[in-house]
Image (cartoon, rainbow, N blue to C red):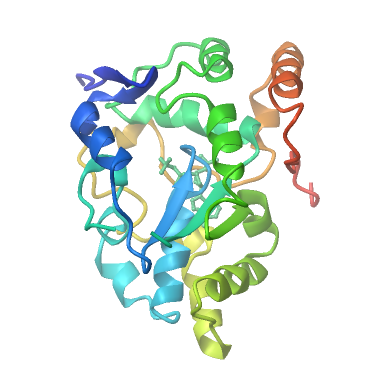
Amino acid sequence: MARLDVTETFHHISFPGHIHTQDSLNYALHFQFQDRDTVIATYPKSGTTWMQEVVTLVKNRGDPQLSKTVPNWARAPWLEQHYCAKGSKAKVIYVARNPKDVVVSYYHFHKMAKFLPEPNSFDEFLDGFLEGTVSYGSWFDHVKGWTSQAGVLAHFLYISYEEMWLDLRGSIERISSFLQCPLVGKELTSALRHCSFSSMSDNAMVNYTLIPQEIMDHSKGKFMRKGKIGDWRNTFTEEQIGCFDTVYSCQMQDCPLTFLWECPES
Ligand SMILES: Nc1ncnc2c1ncn2[C@@H]1O[C@H](COP(=O)(O)OS(=O)(=O)O)[C@@H](OP(=O)(O)O)[C@H]1O
């Protein structure tokens, strides 16, 4: 099957060509947010879809009707894909995930997403990730850039994929109170049920099976792939761990963020 992986660059960052990069990114750059907007900001494969589901369920008080009938990209559109309504004191939720799991997830996603360059070996992909030449640029720049906004933006919530994974109920409570939409009783129980990995894996509105084969080759893998902490251990070699850790400690030396790299239960 032919690939659609034309890459364009914007401000020296690679983007998949299908998003009409120059127009879309210029639009995103000058976008005026409204106070009632909520922005979900993530580096790819860090829990975007999960947070889209949580925010939908919170805003609908745990009622899954919308999340079962409208695809996630229509409920929480990608700003860089031009489909947004106009939007100052918007609430920003930034989700980060430990980058070893991000790069493994991203590598598998490149195999199925025809709008991204076909990856060769994981070794080569990891080099591109550490250099920041992969689509959407450097994970380090993204995470450091966004988290440096914590004290600058009026309403900013930082949460990690791992926090959500370990304590989804507590995370939904935090998110719902941040969104000034606290869930109670059955609302919270329902939201919790519908944004579990298994529920989202079965929900065509969020598992990307609605996307045609020419754009996502579902025979190459599932979007809702594993949903785990520490899966990187199954891919990284000792040499790759050493290389990653060297770049990570150099890039993150002045950054106070810490990540959970392994699942405590394993
Ligand atoms: N509910 C839930 N629980 C646990 N994990 C979940 C959940 N929803 C999505 N995921 C996992 O998130 C990974 C996809 O990340 P993104 O949604 O940011 O991908 S994308 O950038 O929008 O393509 C991808 O991770 P991997 O499984 O490691 O590939 C998804 O499986």
Position above or below: 129 against 44:
above
- Measured as percent of width and height from the top left, residue 216 is found at 28, 35
Q: Residue at x 41, y 42 (%)?
A: 223
Q: Work out whether residue 153 or residue 24 is closer to the camera in this orientation and state it.
A: 153
Instruction: From the viewer's side, name the closer residue of 199 and 100.
Output: 100
* Quadrant of residue 140 within the rendered picture: top right
Give the total of numbered labels: 0
Residue 68 location (% of width, % of height): 31, 69
Residue drawn where x is 51% and y is 48% of the image: 47
Which quarter of the rendering shows the N terminus?
top left
Seen from the viewer's position, the closer of residues 40 and 263 is 40
Quadrant hosting residue 238:
top right
Q: Is residue 30 above or below residue 239?
A: below
Q: Does residue 201 appear in this view?
A: no
Q: Furthest-bottom residue in view?
A: 185
Q: State whether residue 103 is above or below residue 246.
A: below
Residue 252 position in % (x across, y down): 71, 28
Using residue 230 as the reference point, say whether residue 108 is left or right of it: left
Left or right of 65, for residue 176: right
Foreground pick, 195 / 209 = 195
Q: Please give left or right for residue 51 compared with residue 258 in the image.
A: left
Along the horizontal axis of the image, is 241 left or right of 201?
A: right
Q: Quarter-wise, where is residue 178 in the image?
A: bottom right
Residue 32 coordinates in the image, percent (x, y): 29, 52
Is residue 88 placed above or below 229 in the rendered structure? Answer: below
**Residue plotted at (62% across, 66% down):** 171
* Residue 90 visible to the viewer: yes
